[in-house]
Amino acid sequence: MFKQPAQKRKVDSIETSSPSAKVARTDDRLDTTALKRLITQFEKAINTNLEERLKYANDPEKFMESEIKLDNTVKQLQEQFVPNVELYGSFVKWGGVELLLSLLTHENTGTISTNNTHFLDIMLDVLDMISEFTEGDSIRENEEEATILIKKLLDQEIVSLVISVLTDRGLNDANADEAKGVHNILSIIENLIEYDPQIAATATRNTPLLDWCTKNVCKAGEMESNQLYAAEILCILMTNEDNREYFEEQERLELLLVRIGVC
């Protein structure tokens, strides 16, 4: 296993839209009122950024401040909300999942460049959050609440969405932060397959995951961490008999044999 333990960071309060107001905390536990306020802040930050992007489409400097604020809001949400599994159902109820996933389909999450550094940070934080949401420890801590959130993620086609980020967004394994993003995507896939093994079959047939893992594992040179993790995901996919047959039909086996020097 190459999964990194989730780091649950702690702070004493959450800044709201009013500079003088803070969300009350007790023993690092968030209540429903505080969560709702966080989600409202989150939605406002997303909408403000989108509005400014449309208004100043040809002048990125003019929407940079709203992007930084959105980045900070995402980090705040991760720090304050993610450890409180008992509130996952409320997060779903108040539209938190849709807001979160909208940041993976944002117009600025195309090929990564120096012009969208802040949005890259946002996207990577979102992937980190989803990896924590779907972690087995979260499910064991409060199965009922965690299941509500995972089912909502699946309803929103989270598997296809994160795989599209993996295959289409140009994340660079040579960059430590982006490599962590790749790792988190693979972690999400592994977590969801553990939750529902049938996802292995649907992901294999309906997404480019199998091709991505095969090509990644077969890259020349010494295998790095995410290549090893891709090999692990490939092994998980191959526990499904239909996937094994599909794999052989697509003549991918020869690629792996070449990689290990058998042919």
Image: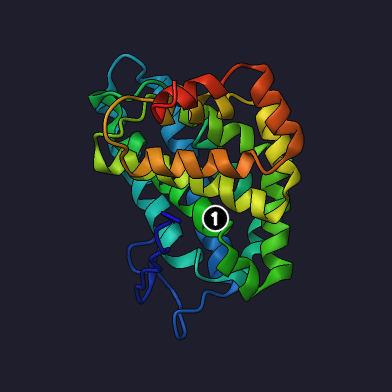
Whether residue 90 is visible to the viewer of this picture, yes or no, is: yes
Say which element carries label 1: helix
Q: Nearer the viewer, residue 40 or 19?
A: 40
Coordinates of residue 244 in the picture (x, y in percent): 69, 32
Residue at the outermost top position: 58
Residue at the outermost bottom position: 27
Q: Quadrant of residue 9?
A: bottom left
Q: Is residue 21 above or below residue 101?
A: below
Which residue is painted at 33% across and 63% down in the image?
Answer: 19
Q: Quadrant of residue 101?
A: top right
Q: Is residue 7 above or below residue 174?
A: below
Q: Is residue 175 above or below residue 218?
A: below
Q: Nearer the viewer, residue 39 or 206?
A: 206
Residue, disc 1: 39
Coordinates of residue 223 in the picture (x, y in percent): 32, 37
Coordinates of residue 225 in the picture (x, y in percent): 34, 44
Q: Quadrant of the N terminus?
A: bottom left
Mark 1 residue crowding within 10 angstroms, few (<14) / some (14–19) / many (20+):
many
Q: Quadrant of residue 119?
A: top left
Residue at the outermost front position: 262
Which residue is painted at 35% across and 20% down in the image?
Answer: 56
Q: Nearer the viewer, residue 96 or 2?
A: 2
**Relative side of 195 to 131, left or right:** right
Coordinates of residue 5 in the picture (x, y in percent): 41, 64
**Relative side of 43 to 113, left or right:** right
Q: Is residue 110 above or below residue 180?
A: above
